[in-house]
Amino acid sequence: MLHAGRYVELESTLCELLERHPDSGAAWQMLGVALARQGKNSVHASAMAAKLLPTDAGAHNNLGNALARLGQWDQAVASYGRALSFKPNFSDAHSNLGNAFSELGQFEAAAASYRRALEINPQLFEAHNHLGNALRLLYRPAEAAASYRRALEIQPDFAEAHSNLGNVLVDLGQLNEALASYRRALTLKPNFAEAHNNMGSLLRGFGQLAEAIASYRRALVLKPDFAEAHSNLGIALRLLGRTVEAEASCRRALEINPKLTAAVAALAETHADRGLFAEAEEIFKRIISIEPESPEGWAGISSLRKMSVDDAAWLTVAQKIASQQLSPRREAYLRYAIGKYFDDVQDFDQAFSSFRRANELAKQYGATHDRRAVEQAVDQITRLYDRSWLSEAGTFTMKPERPVFIIGMLRSGTTLAEQILASHPAVYGAGELPYWTNAFAAYKPSADGSGTSAALLRRLAADYLRLLQDLSADARHVLDKMPANFWALGLIHAALPGARIIHMRRNPIDTCLSIYFQRFETGVSYANDLEDLAHYYTQYLRLVTHWRTILRADSILDVTYEDLVENQDAWTRKMLAFIGLPYDARCVDFHLTNRTVITASKWQVRQKISASSVDRWRNYEKFISPLLKLRELDPGG
C-alpha cells in the first residue's frame, strides 16, 4: 500500500494493527511514514517508533523529519544525531542534519553536514543544491555556484538548482547568465513562484520595472502568501511612483511576515519620498529592533538628513557592522552611508576611502560596464537619427505642448528643476517615467530611414499622452524627469515635436563624483569606476551635441545647475517662460511644496537652495585624477 500511494488505507490498517500490538515499533514507524506522506503530524508515531526501536537509525531520522516539519529544529538536530550515532554513514541523515542547521542559521555546520553526506553518496543532487545554499549564505558565491552546477550535472532538470544558480550569478555580477538560469528554471517549472520572484528582482536591477512587476504578480498568483514577492512588488511600484500601491504591498508582506526587514525598509522609503523624514527614521529603527545589526536599517537613517559629529554613535555601530562578514551588496549599502557621514562632517579622506570601498563592492554584483558598446550605441544613433530622418519623421506627427522633458546626466540637477517647476499650480511632476526608455529600446530605424512609420509615431505619441492624462487630468504641463531620455530625444522630438526639453548641465566633475558617491536602486553600470564615468560623460555630451544640431533650436533650453543655484529667481522665470507659463512665487519656495520625490535628492530638494554642492570636487581633487580631464567640458568654464 505504501508503494502504491494508498496512504489513507495504510493508516487505517496500521491503526487497527496497533490496537492489537501497541508495542510494534515497525508498525509505529510505518504509520509515521503514512501520516507524513499525507501531510499530517507524524511526531507521535515517529517518537513511538524511535522509543521501541532505540537503535534503529531510520526511526530516529524519521522522527527528526517529523520534528523538522513542525519547525522544531533543535529537537530535529538531536534526533538526526542519534540516527548517525547508530549509522555513521547514513547519507540522508547527514543531509537532513544540514537542513536543520541551516534553519538554525548555523551555516558552517550545515555545510559540513552536506559535505559529509556527499562524501558518502556523491550523487545526492539535492545535497549539492543545499550545500550551495549554505555556501551562498556564508558569502562564498563561487563555491556555491560550483555546488549548484554539480547538482545540475547529476539532475539537469532540477528547476530549484537552476533558480538558485541564477541567484548566485547575480551575486557574482553575471547578470545575463543569471537571466538564462531563471528562464531555464521557469521552462522546466512554469509555476515556480520563487523563480518568478527572482526573475523580477533581476529585471528590477536592469531598470525594467514593468517587466519586474509582471514577474512579481505572477509569483503572487501562484503563491498568494509569498511575503518576499509582496515586498519586492512594493519596491518596484515605489520606483515607478505608485506610492499608495507600494505601501499596500509592503503592508501585505508584513501581515504575512512581520519581521521581513526588506518590506519595512521599503515602507520607510515611501515615507521619506513624501518628505516624512521623522516618520521614516522611526520605521528604519523598527528594522534595527528586528535585526540589531541590519545594514539596511542603519544605512537608511543616514539618508534622511545631514549627519553631524553628534552622530558619532551611529558611526561606531555602522563601522562595526561593516567590518563583519557581509555579502558585498549589504556591506556596500553601509559603506555608501559611512561615506556620506564623513562627507557631511567634512572628513574628506575618510569619505573617499569609504566611497571607494563601496564602489569596489558594487562592481562585484553589478553589471559589467562596456565602454565600447556605449560608443557604438552613440555612433549608431548619430548615424541613423540624422536631419533627413527627422525631416521625414516630422511630417507625420501631432504637436502637443503638454509634455515637458527634463534630461541630463544623473545628479545634474534634474530633480531640483522638476521640484521648482512642479511647484507651479499649472504643472504636475510625474517623476521618472520609463515610457521612452522602453519605446526607444524597441524602436530600431533602418539605415535608409525606411523603418520610420507614421502609424508607429502616432501610436507612441497617443499612448504617451494617454499616460500623462492618467497621471494628471487637469495640469497644463506634465513633467517627465527621466534623465536618460537624452538617449531617445530624436524619437521623442519626432513623435512630439511640440514638447519642450529642459537640459540640465552641471560641472562634469561634480556630476560624476556625485554619481560615484551614490548607491542606486537599479543598475547604473558606469557608476562604480572613475574612468568609466569620465568616458560615459564624454559620450553623453557627444550625443546631446548631436541632438542640438538636428532638433529645432527653440525646443531645448540648456540650464546650468550652478547658474540656477546662483540666480534662482532669474532662471526660474526663464524655465517658466520657456514652457509658456507666467511666473509664480511658489516656484521660488519649492522646498515647501508637498509632493512625492523618488530620487536620491529627496532630502535636498526640501531644503532652501544652496551652493554647497558647487565645486564639491575640489575637496577630493587628489583622489579623482581620471575625472580631471573633464574640466574643459565645464558648462560654466
Image (spheres, rainbow, N blue to C red):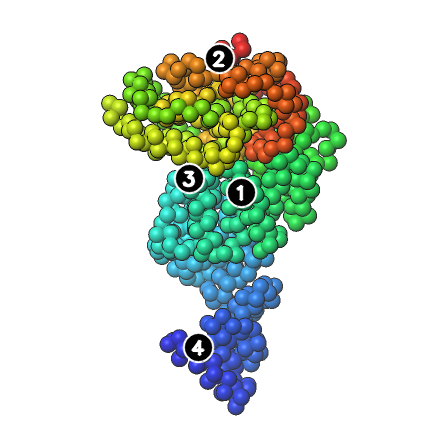
In this rendering, the label closer to the viewer, 3 or 2: 2
The amino acid at mark 3 is: Leu
Dot 4 or dot 1: first in sequence order is: 4
Mark linked to residue 552: none
In this rendering, the label closer to the viewer, 3 or 1: 1
Q: Is residue 12 above or below residue 287?
A: below
Q: Are marks 4 and 1 in contact (CB under 8 Å)?
A: no
Task: Give the residue at mark 3.
Answer: 175
Secondary structure at numbered mark 4:
helix
The amino acid at mark 4 is: Tyr
Kindly report the distance in space between the C-alpha atoms of the residues bearing marks 1 and 2: 37 Å
Instruction: From the top left corner, tell me how far across and down residue 21 is, in percent.
Output: 52, 88
Task: Give the residue at mark 2.
Answer: 633
Name the side, left or right, on which 301 lies relative to 439: right
Dot 1 or dot 2: first in sequence order is: 1
Secondary structure at numbered mark 3:
helix
Task: Give the residue at mark 1.
Answer: 235
**Residue nearer the viewer, 504 or 40:** 504
Task: Give the residue at mark 4.
Answer: 7
Secondary structure at numbered mark 2:
helix
Image quadrant of residue 156? Answer: bottom left
Q: Are marks 4 and 2 in contact (CB under 8 Å)?
A: no
Kindly report the distance in space between the C-alpha atoms of the residues bearing marks 4 and 3: 45 Å
Q: Are marks 1 and 2 in contact (CB under 8 Å)?
A: no
Image quadrant of residue 395? Answer: top left
Inspect this view and state whether residue 129 appears. Answer: no
Label 2 neighbour load within 10 Å: few <14, some 14-19, many 20+: some
Label 1 neighbour load within 10 Å: few <14, some 14-19, many 20+: many
